[in-house]
Amino acid sequence: MEPWLQPEVIQQARRICVSFRQWTGRSLLADAAEDGLCLAQQLFHWSQPVLSHGCETDPLLNYGNQAALSLWELSWGELVQLPSRLTAEPMAQEERARLLAQAARQGYTNNYSGVRISRSGRRFRIENAWIWTVLDEMGTPVGQAATFDQWQFL
């Protein structure tokens, strides 16, 4: 079964998109569907990578669209077991943590650039990243999400 057909993934896709609009006043997807299933399908197949993690002490990834899965060379099952800090090399994790803390304080941050690493060790630089706090339906923070529109393999 495609990941975006799972009820918890449909819910997370909606939370990601609604939270992005709430914080930035912008739509994450042009012509985003209102229906949860259609929105989940659109986000999963969007050309820009989108990732999110929860609020655990060492947050685990809980969403990655097909572009993110391909870029990080992960299956869905591998992604949802991965601590999000491992998407960056150890030397880049401190900067990543600082940005996540800034996004948590402000709701979002943008124009972030940094080096990331795939499962096979392939390094790539991301540009113009947006990071925002994901809220549940009651407005409670349940994690953070990120997207970016530019990357280059190193």
Image (spheres, rainbow, N blue to C red):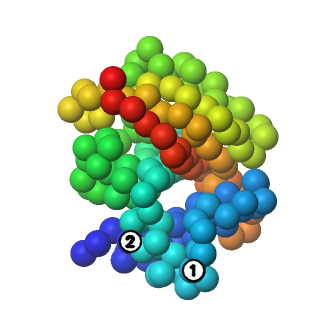
Q: Is residue 19 something one can see in this rendering?
A: no
Which residue in the structure is indicated by mark 1?
Answer: 33
Amino acid type at mark 1: Ala
Image quadrant in which you'd find residue 110: top right
Q: Is residue 6 left or right of residue 121?
A: right
Instruction: Depth check: give the residue in front, 112 or 101.
Output: 112
Residue 123 image position (x, y, % from top left): 32, 26
State if disc 1 and disc 2 touch (CB < 8 Å): no
Q: Residue at x 48, y 81 (%)?
A: 38
Q: In terms of sequence position, does the residue under pointer 2 or pointer 1 come before the other?
A: 2
Identify the residue at horizontal 54%, vertical 19% (top origin). Answer: 94
Q: At which x and y percent is residue 82?
A: 35, 42
Residue drawn 41% across the image and 65% down it:
44
For label 2, the residue is 4
Say what secondary structure mark 2 lies in.
Answer: helix
Q: Amino acid at mark 2?
A: Trp
**16 w.r.t. 35: above or below:** above
Which corner quadrant holds the C terminus?
Answer: top left
Quadrant including the N terminus: bottom left
Instruction: Look at discs 2 and 1 and give the one toward the viewer.
Output: 1
Horizontal side of residue 104 vs 78, given as left or right: right
Residue 70: x, y in percent?
29, 49
Crowd class of label 2 (few under 14; some 14 to 19; many from 20; radius 10 Å): many
| Left-right relation of 67 to 147 | left
Residue 45 at x, y = what percent? 39, 66
